[in-house]
């Protein structure tokens, strides 16, 4: 079982509850992902407040996530176990409804076409903050038919979508002049995102602005007032429904992993940066508080949830019926082998003298020096073929002590906890559909 946030009736944030859900099994075209960070979007609370999309209760909210692939269906070709991925998982199903199981859960399944590999320079939190907002932000420029060299006026430059629209206008779509609106405390912040000019809407009304712009991009649904800054024939895009001015065109996101992949060069070069609201990230246990904050409408960038409780859970990939183990540390995934009880020999290890010099408890010395951990050659060759470092990991009754002893003199599996028997590990694999 896993922990997930859910609700069984529509209403305010208090309808959210934390409960146990089965770990889902990936379909042939799906990945099972252990969520390491998620992000909230207004759609998550709008959908919780009233039935926007038809779905059965309980609903697990959340669209955005970044995490680690722990299992995959038989038709998956682009991703492997241990890959770090991110994406907006809430595509519509064949009946036109959103999928039920959202990202405020320790494990989610997602079609491989909806996710992309996480750029290495981004943390899980940064990656999770991007998908839904950046997909929306990009679509608005496409809807408008925006051309390089045009000017743009952005209503709401400080929110989850707005912070990305400002950066994209400047660094990806080549706007010649970018103006964005926000309130007094955030003027310098929006300038720092690359806006040429920031209008403080608490001091300046739209009809006091003399200049007219080639494109009006409204992220907060204020077109009924903001339309006055658009040139006569200029496109006006509204991402809220319904658009509040007859000239405005509603623009909605396209959910796609390929589109995220196209952003990789901009994310790697820092031309596009994830913006995480400074009140977060919020712990998984504090999801209700995170919603309370998002629902004030004052977020600065994205409201992110991290860490998740299963952060350090080891997970396993069985290759060719051998127990090849992927061990996740805080940020990295290494490969090791589960050593069965039967692999432990009573023979004296060659490095007995060496072991005696290590600062470990006497009983550990006895264990470590009296058992020789012999990695079967077939397991070794598989790892070597994949060019991976061999890390011996012990499962079994004495596993904890031996793993601890190994840690002292191998120093290679700092956070890995392998204290279960091989039978227990296999049972977990079965439950996770691996
Ligand atoms: N169509 C789609 O596919 C799609 C996708 C994503 C989101 N949306 C919708 O788009 C809207 C924005 O989403 P989001 O994630 O960016 O929300 P958000 O992060 O909650 O937006 C918060 C920001 O809005 C700004 N804001 C509020 N009133 C403002 C005003 N009068 N003028 C200028 N800025 C103002 C706030 O800045 P100040 O504190 O400075 O006012 C704050 O930084 C939501 O309604 C959401 O549901 C639609």
Image (cartoon, rainbow, N blue to C red):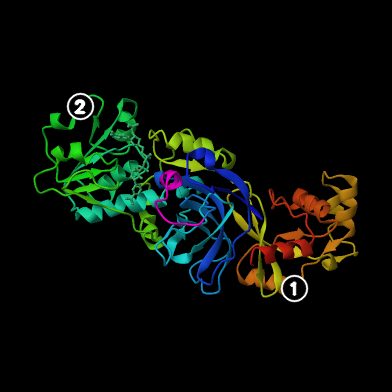
Q: Considering the numbered disc 2 on the image, is that residue within a helix, a strand or a loop?
A: loop
- Tell me if residue 49 is in the magenta stretch: yes
Give how far across and how far down residue 326 sits, in percent.
65, 60
Q: Residue at x 65, y 69 (%)?
A: 384
Q: Mark 1 or mark 2: which comes first in sequence?
A: 2
The magenta segment is: 44-56
Residue denoted by label 2: 204
Pair 1/2: label in front: 2
* Res 379 → quadrant: bottom right
Please identify the quadrant where the C terminus is shown: bottom right
User: Looking at the rendered structure, which numbered label has been put on residue 377?
Assistant: 1
Q: Is residue 80 magenta?
A: no
Residue in the picture at 38% in, 59% down = 255
Q: Is residue 154 left or right of residue 19?
A: left
Question: Could you say which disc has been placed on residue 292 in the image?
Answer: none
Q: CA distance from mark 1 to mark 2?
A: 74 Å
Q: Position of residue 429 (x, y in %)?
A: 68, 64
């Amino acid at each position: 079982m896993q922990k997930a946030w859910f609700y069984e009736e529509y209403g305010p944030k208090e309808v959210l509850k934390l409960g146990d859900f089965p770990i889902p099994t990936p379909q042939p075209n799906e990945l099972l992902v252990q969520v390491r960070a998620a992000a909230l979007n207004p759609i998550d609370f709008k959908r919780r407040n009233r039935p926007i999309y038809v779905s059965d209760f309980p609903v697990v909210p959340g669209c955005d996530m970044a995490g680690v692939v722990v299992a995959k269906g038989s038709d998956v070709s682009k991703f492997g176990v241990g890959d770090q991925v991110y994406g907006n998982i809430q595509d519509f199903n064949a009946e036109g409804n959103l999928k039920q199981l959202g990202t405020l859960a320790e494990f989610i399944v997602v079609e491989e076409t909806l996710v992309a590999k996480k750029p290495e320079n981004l943390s899980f939190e940064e990656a999770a903050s991007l998908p839904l907002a950046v997909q929306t932000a990009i679509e608005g420029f496409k809807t408008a038919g925006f051309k390089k060299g045009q000017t743009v006026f952005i209503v709401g430059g400080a929110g989850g979508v707005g912070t990305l629209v400002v950066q994209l206008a400047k660094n990806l779509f080549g706007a010649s002049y970018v103006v964005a609106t926000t309130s007094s405390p955030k003027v310098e912040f929006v300038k720092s995102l690359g806006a040429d000019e920031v209008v403080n809407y608490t001091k300046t009304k739209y009809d006091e602005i003399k200049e007219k712009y080639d494109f009006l991009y409204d992220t907060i649904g204020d077109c009924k007032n903001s339309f006055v800054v658009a040139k006569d024939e200029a496109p006006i895009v509204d991402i809220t429904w319904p658009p509040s001015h007859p000239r405005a065109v509603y623009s909605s996101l396209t959910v796609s992993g390929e589109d995220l992949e196209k952003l990789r060069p901009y994310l790697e070069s820092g031309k596009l940066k994830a913006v995480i609201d400074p009140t977060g990230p919020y712990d998984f246990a504090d999801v209700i508080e995170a919603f309370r904050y998002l629902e004030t409408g004052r977020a600065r960038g994205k409201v992110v949830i991290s860490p998740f409780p299963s952060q350090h859970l080891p997970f396993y990939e069985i290759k060719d019926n051998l127990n090849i183990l992927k061990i996740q540390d805080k940020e990295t995934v290494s490969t090791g082998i589960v050593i069965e009880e039967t692999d432990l020999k009573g023979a004296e290890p060659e490095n007995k003298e060496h072991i005696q010099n290590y600062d470990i408890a006497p009983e550990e010395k006895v264990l470590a020096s009296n058992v020789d951990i012999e990695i079967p050659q077939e397991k070794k060759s598989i790892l070597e073929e994949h060019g991976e470092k061999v890390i011996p990991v012990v499962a079994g009754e004495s596993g904890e002590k031996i793993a601890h002893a190994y840690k002292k003199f191998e120093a290679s599996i700092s956070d890995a906890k392998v204290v279960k028997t091989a039978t227990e590990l296999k049972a977990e694999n079965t439950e996770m559909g691996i």
